[in-house]
Amino acid sequence: MAQLHKRFTDEQVRDLMKRYSNGEIKREHVQTVLNIGKSRFFSLMNLYRKNPVAFSIAYKRTKATRVIAGPLERNILKELAVALEVY
């Protein structure tokens, strides 16, 4: 199952939350469409109610990925240099 932010746009989820808030559709229907559980639904609903205009399901990373720490990278490069000298 793909992540929610990869399957739906912010606008699509915002529309479902708006329709649920207005009583047009049931919670179970929203959960089925989004393929999420009850806890995740209410978590999203909470975020939506706090600020409907700025509501977003976009995933934001807190730090860079695939980064090797400086000292570790220097050590790896040094070992590679030694290995190349042997050959």
Image (cartoon, helix red, strand yellow):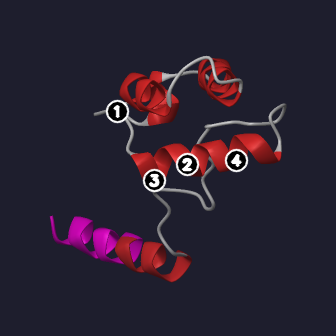
Question: Which mark sits nearer the N-terminus, 1 or 3?
Answer: 1
Residue on which disc 1 sits: 2
Residue extent of the magenta highlight: 77-87
N-terminal label among 4 and 1: 1
**How much space separates mark 2 and mark 3, taking CA atoms?**
5 Å
Q: Amino acid at mark 1?
A: Ala
- Alpha carbon distance from label 4 to label 3: 13 Å
Element type where label 4 sits in the image: helix
Q: Earlier in the sequence, mark 2 or mark 1?
A: 1
Residue at the image point whose x is 62% and y is 17% from the top: 24
Q: Position of residue 57 (x, y in %)?
A: 61, 37
Percent of width and height locating residue 4: 46, 34
Quadrant holding the N terminus: top left
Q: Amino acid at mark 3?
A: Ser
Q: Give the secondary structure at mark 2.
A: helix
Which residue is label 2 attached to?
A: 42
Tag of residue 39: 3
